[in-house]
Amino acid sequence: MIFTFLLLSIGCGLGIEASNQMKLIQDILESYDRKTKPTWDNNKAINVTFSMDLYQILELNEPQQFLLLNSWIIERWHDEFLFWHPEEYGNITELRLPYDCIWLPDTTLYNSLVMKDDDSRRLLNAKLTTNITRKAVLVELLYPTIYKFSCLLNLRYFPYDLQECTMTFSSWTYDSKGIDYLPYSDNIGTSNYLENEGWYLLKTTIQRKEVKYSCCPNS
């Protein structure tokens, strides 16, 4: 088998679009602090829209009472500090940046048995779309992840048992006045789901619940 490549040298010069993009990135990140919640009114919560697409149930471990699954997560929010006017940068309205350049919600699966998610996020880019009406940038972060979380199983009717497992997501450091989570839809996406040989997936739902803790009245 023979592969033939025809290569054309185009030199090292940057096109106008690339030049505009580089200037845009430099301008919006010049004084940007990714450790600061990106809203000019610090009393206003950042609304984070959360959605999940389930790909596969890898394991339902009955002795150790946990579920292992493979999924894709999409988080969306508006960042006021990254806003730009497209006409000043060659009408660029979309941009992609490495996730570690910008502020991110510290979304955490509270009943997770594994807290580290650096491996799933380390190669990601966030999609930025400027919004003139809101004077903010819509940030969309999509990443694959494997969740291992606790699930209390009732084995009374094994092997014809019906199990229900719950995942609880929220911010680890912000209360509801800092970050407010909203479901993107009423259920988990299953259009690409691969059936498990031992279990049938009957139903998925997503609900938003507010929980007040005695230690933290705004949580």
Image: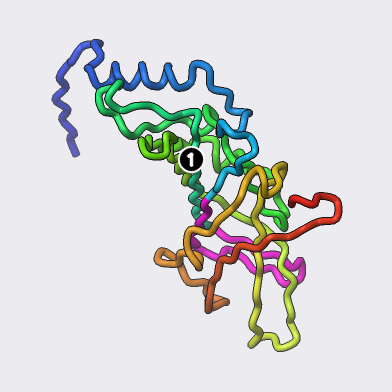
Q: State which region is magenta.
A: 49-70
Q: Quadrant of residue 84?
A: top left
Q: Is residue 93 above or below residue 176?
A: above
Mark count: 1
Residue at x-position 64% and y-position 87%:
160
- Does the magenta-highlighted stretch encompass residue 207? no
Residue pushed farthest right?
215
- Residue 127, image x, y percentages: 41, 38
Q: Quadrant of residue 69?
A: bottom right
Residue at x-position 44% and y-position 35%:
136
- Residue 13, image x, y percentages: 23, 11
Tell me: 178 left or right of 121.
Answer: right
Identify residue type, mark 1.
Answer: His
Residue at x-position 48% and y-position 43%:
141
Q: Which residue is mark 1?
A: 78
Q: Main secondary structure of the magenta part?
A: strand
